Image (tube, rainbow, N blue to C red):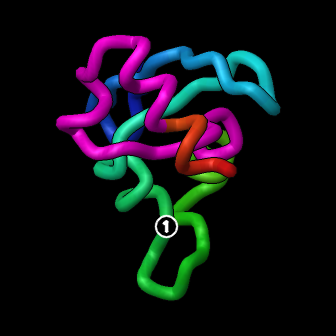
């Protein structure tokens, strides 16, 4: 779980073929980290973003680990 802007966002650790174990989170978090021009909304937003390797939908974050791992590995290639 990551907290940003007083909201909690789900995270998961996933093993990837190329990058080892990485932290992923939900697109809803990604959406509030940047402004309309693509810049970070704050230094904290940049710090949070640098911790997250990949963002998935709210539905995908709840997948069984094997399915989520397969999804991440196919999308980052």
The location of residue 73, given as percent across then percent down, is: 59, 36
Q: Is residue 75 visible?
A: yes
Residue at the image position 28 percent from the left and 45 percent from the top: 57
| Above or below for 3 versus 58 | above
> Which element type, helix, strand or loop, lies under badge 1?
loop
Q: Which residue is mark 1?
A: 34
Give the residues in magenta.
49-71
Is residue 33 rendered to the left or right of residue 5? Answer: right
- Residue farthest along the left direction in this orientation: 59
- Along the line of sight, which residue is nearer the eye, 34 or 12? 12
Is residue 48 found inside the magenta-colored segment of the image? no
The location of residue 68, given as percent across then percent down, is: 40, 25
Q: Is residue 48 visible?
A: no
| Above or below for 22 versus 37 | above
From the image, give the main secondary structure of the stretch colored magenta: helix
- Along the line of sight, which residue is nearer the eye, 65 or 24? 65
């Amino acid at each position: 779980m990551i907290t940003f802007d007083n909201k909690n966002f789900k995270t998961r650790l996933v093993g990837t073929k190329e990058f080892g174990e990485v932290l992923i989170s939900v697109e809803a978090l990604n959406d509030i980290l940047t402004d309309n021009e693509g810049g970070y909304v704050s230094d904290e937003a940049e710090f949070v973003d640098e911790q997250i390797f990949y963002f998935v939908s709210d539905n995908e974050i709840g997948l069984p680990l094997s399915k989520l791992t397969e999804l991440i590995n196919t999308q980052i290639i």
